Amino acid sequence: MTHQLRIENLHVAVAGKPILQGVNLSMNQGDTHALMGPNGSGKSTLGMAIMGHPIYEVSEGSIFLDDQDLLAMAPDERARQGVFMAFQRPVAIPGVKMADFLRHATTNVRNPERKEGEELIPMADFRRELKDRMGQLQMELEFARRYVNDGFSGGEMKRAEILQLAMLQPKFAVLDETDSGLDADAVRLASESIAAIGGESMGLLIITHHDKLLVHNPPDFTHVMLGGRIVETGGPELARELHGEGYQRIRDAYPEAEAENQTMAEADTLVAVEPEN
Ligand code: ADP
Ligand code: MG
């Protein structure tokens, strides 16, 4: 069965401030969608709402994974059902090794009914799989012994996200600027890695400013967000146009959304996304 993720008329606010204003987007497993748009247009907010981050309040609309109501699920349940997000700014978990974190997460995704404390994937099986995946991604095994994102460089954080993607094999993945802060070689490696592990089995929503990430992952659809709406959808040629020429044509063509984008950018209260420790 081909799985489907359906976002319908989604309205999302942060601290009472409306951000997304009626987003519609449907994805099939196996498809690659590029999500583009100027800074502050609402791209990350859409990803956060798909994952169920609590500060992003859905005031209207729905998200379905096949016939399941995603909005009724807690974030960990969404992950268990096969929805994944590689964050633009991943959180560090000092004291928790990558390998242990991945073994837990992988077990939970493969056995969604598992209760905390129940058995994990056998160590030998997990090690073998981790080693294979890391080999495929040209990563040193030593990397898995480090604490999750603790003291990681920008590039290492992105690679850690890609390793999670490879191990968890979600049905749908949102990759939020998995290319930001990487040099050209690192972007190419990330792009190849995503193509190697994504393939037919995942639906990818790739939020990106760079065409490099799309070279190995040519989008079936390109969506442009402005002022909390998807104002245009096209094919790979739309991504190429925006990379080459920027957003001026879009800003001129959708003055209301552009005005909304400006208003959103002027608001100054930022709500902390990371939990207080
Ligand atoms: P993009 O990812 O397209 O750059 P975002 O989704 O991060 O855009 O932001 C869209 C708008 O929502 C911006 O105006 C931003 O200030 C606001 N916003 C997003 N996250 C927060 C937050 N945690 N607190 C306050 N405002 C936020
Ligand atoms: Mg963003």
Image (spheres, rainbow, N blue to C red):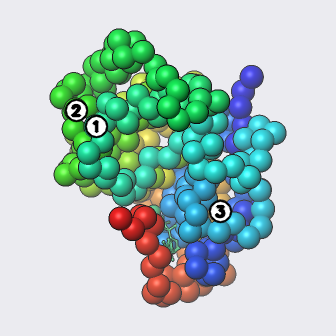
Residue identifier under label 1: 97
Q: How far apart are marks 1 and 3 (CA)?
A: 39 Å
Instruction: Look at the image and tell me whether residue 223 can be seen.
Output: no
Q: Mark 1 or 3, which is nearer the eye?
A: 1
Quarter holding the N terminus is top right
Amino acid type, mark 1: Lys
Circle 2 Cα neighbour tier, 10 Å, few/some/many (<14 / 14–19 / ≥20): few
Q: Which of marks 2 and 1 is nearer the N terminus?
A: 1
Front tag of 2 and 3:
2
Give the residue drawn at x 26%, y 45%. 95
Label 1: how many Cα within 10 Å (few below 14, some 14–19, many 20+): some
Residue 80, percent from left and from top: 60, 36
For image coordinates 72% across by 41% down, the residue present is 65
Q: Residue at x 55, y 55 (%)?
A: 47
Please provide percent x and percent y for residue 150: 23, 50
Residue on which the image places disc 3: 230
Q: Name the residue under label 2.
A: 145
Q: State which quadrant residue 184 falls in.
A: top left
